[in-house]
Image: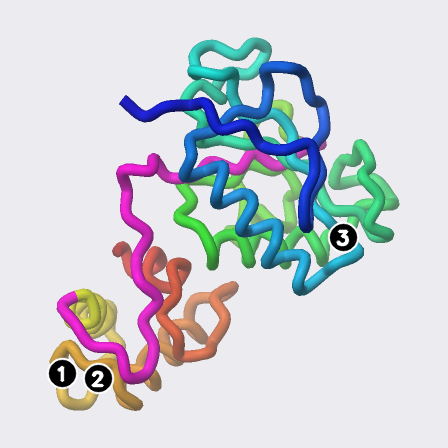
Amino acid sequence: MVKIESLVPVNGVGFRTNNRTDNSHFATQVVHDLLIKIAGLWHDLHPDHPISIGQVSHKGGGEFPPHKQHKLGIEADMRPLSKDGQDLHLTFNSPEYSRDLTREFVKFLRSNANMHQVFFNDPKLIAEGLTHHAGGHDNHLHLWFEDEQASTPRVLRNFTKGDDVKRFQEKLIAAGFPIKGGADGKFGQNTEDAVRAFQTAHPPLTANGIADEATQSALGL
């Protein structure tokens, strides 16, 4: 059984916490490490705009009222990002809310972690396919990570080889994006061109020719 006993620190590089009690910020080791990693990488991009992590789970998991979920140590709340980097209680209608930074963070998150879902009721982010609607989520994001039994796919790029490259190529071809030479398990320039074409046709994916987690997920992998 997966243990839920890794306590997210009060603060660290790229993050702080909010709505904290003695028994509110426990996660599985995998999700704990992911949160720390993502915050650190975000800090490299935006050192003056740390994320604010809300409640996660109780130690050991289980019911966590008034939350309907937060039982398994794989979900974490997060405040929307503000324009000036302050840790504020915001909604998507607040004048201090930064949609641009929050959008960037959700894209960044999806590129660096295997996400089951992200709930947040900003209608523009929902329209862009970045978040989903859920009751009571006007003022915070609900980050729902995949169960740690699920594997995070390897990022595929030029010069990578393997069975996962071949499976990806087969999916890409089946989706209507042919690769000269076919699915040979070798990620070369022809595959990169096909990936870039697929990404261009599927915003908000970044058309960089790199098959990251978001691109593979869009292909159903």
Amino acid at dot 2:
Ile
The segment highlighted magenta reads 138-163
Q: Are marks 2 and 1 in contact (CB under 8 Å)?
A: yes
Indicate the position of residue 100 as horizontal and vertical percent values: 72, 58
Work out how far the residue at label 2 is from the one at label 1, CA to CA, in angstroms.
5 Å
What residue appears at the point 74 percent right and 40 percent down from the top-left corner?
Answer: 92
Quadrant assignment, res 95:
top right
Quadrant assignment, res 178:
bottom left
What residue appears at the point 41 percent right and 39 percent down from the top-left corner?
Answer: 30
- Residue 127 falls left or right of residue 219: right
Indicate the position of residue 52 as horizontal and vertical percent values: 70, 39
* Mark sitting earlier along the chain (3/1): 3
Residue 179 is labelled as 2
Indicate the position of residue 72 as horizontal and vertical percent values: 41, 23
Q: Are marks 2 and 3 in contact (CB under 8 Å)?
A: no
Q: Which residue is mark 1?
A: 182
Element assignment for label 1 = loop
